[in-house]
Amino acid sequence: MATIKITDLNREGGIGANSYHVEFGPWRFVVDTGLHPKFAGYEALPTYSQIPDDSLDFILVTHAHLDHLGSLPVLARRHPDAKIIMSSGTSAIAGRMLRNSVQIMKIQRSELGISEYPLYTRGEIAIVEDQILPMEFLRPFRLGEDKDTLEIELHPSGHIPGAAAVRMTYAGRTILFSGDIQFQHQQILDGAYVPEIRPDLLVMETTRGATPSSPDNDRETVISKLLETISKILKQGGSCLVPVFALGRMQEMLAVVQMALHNGKLPPCQVFCSGLGMDIVNYFDLLSRKKGYPRFDRSILKDLGIRPPSRDLKPGRNPGNKGLYLVSSGMLVEKTPSYNLAASLIQDPANGICFIGYCDPDTPGGQLKTTKHGENFYFEELNHETTLQAEIHNFDLTGHAERSELLDFAQKQKADSILLTHGDQEARQWFIDKLEDVCPSSRILSPKPGETIKL
Ligand SMILES: [Zn+2]
Ligand SMILES: [Zn+2]
């Protein structure tokens, strides 16, 4: 029987530099090539040194978020003959995301003195783009010949456009990677479609393991509540900031806002957007025309009369124009439009900030979420301290499945072994406890970083 050996190369184990090295029979490959958003320099990379150079048959990337894609050129440089496999949707966006990453690393090199940045060049991204084999969803393809054939099938995972769950079958054994997965439909994208596969090994994300499921988490309910809150803030004469991730969430919010303005769920207002997300709009538009997904048309920008926010924002002073601001970053990271806007908005009780996704507790967004009304908040990078008077609201419009949905998924898949990934310790522990009841015949694995599991 073909052996499976799988090693988590993410040196921290949580959500970060996602990467797995897999030995499957004679095949050697890596699934995902992340870059850790919280670490800097070489520390942000997966432990690629655990793999002998020039040993991989292929590298597969599940989707274009940088915690899965961001170090692809570094790994590809060490394995120049490895094929690079991703969905055609992901391949359409990957180069743009990597070039943005180079730009940010160059800024960090000069501002923070990180001498190894950028970790790769635009030239290396071009080489990677040449090596990509773009694949379609639900069309199995084969690598190798005769008895050494490995079959791969990509399933839409509903997380962001192009995101895939991956089935790999060799010599009668199967591995299924859930990837980052969302079963509920989003405004611009259908939920995941993964049939019952009964794999030998299911590698499953656990992002929301520590977040209780609730009927109020239903996406439609959350969107209604979000729109009510934005309306209230605009009607009381304030501006509303919705910090969004550039890839996926900004475009979904544009579609939500367009529909709400058309059916009267939002009052007429000026909508402001900027940054990488505006560029991704063009890629989604092209993808929609070529592949039929996501449900997205760039005419939305014209329809909504989108404008960029003013460039001369001053901390503590309302921006010149009132309205709805859909800008990145989602976690109010320093030097981003959302960070600067928050510094202009939070001193005024008429204004509001609506967070729609996860914020790492160490980011300014995470810190603002735990700041109480009337307490002081310090915008370190701007050296600006002010009292929080604006409304702060949280809505869960994540691209990740609820934990109860993942339990159902695991139960349906009837895997021999389930390996937990992409979640912090608390999230994984919840799954370890629950899966023992729900999937009593499955072996539950939560390996330490760098540890190899043999099946
Ligand atoms: Zn993701
Ligand atoms: Zn992820």
Image (cartoon, grey):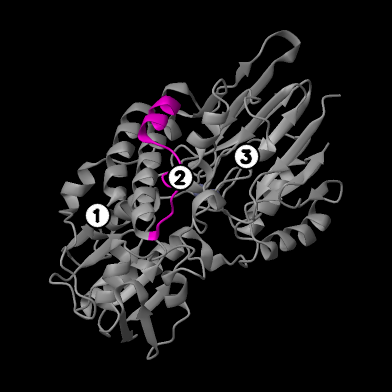
| Amino acid at pointer 1 | Ser
Q: Is residue 45 left or right of residue 406?
A: left
The answer to whether 312 appears left or right of 138 in the picture is left
Q: Amino acid at mark 2?
A: Ile
Q: Which residue is mark 2?
A: 160
Residue underneath mark 3? 48
Q: Secondary structure at mark 2?
A: loop
* Earlier sequence position, callout 2 versus callout 1: 2
Residue 196 appears in view: no
Residue at the farthest bottom position = 374
What amino acid is found at the position of numbered circle 3 in the picture? Tyr
| Residue 274: assigned label | 1
Side of 167 where 258 appears, left or right: left
Q: Which residues are magenta?
A: 112-129
Instruction: Give the secondary structure at mark 3.
Output: helix
Lower sequence index among marks 3 and 2: 3
At a point 82% along the width and 29% down the height, the residue shown is: 3
Q: Depth check: 146 or 303 in front?
A: 146
SS label for mark 1: loop
Residue 42 lies, in percent from the top left, at 54, 49
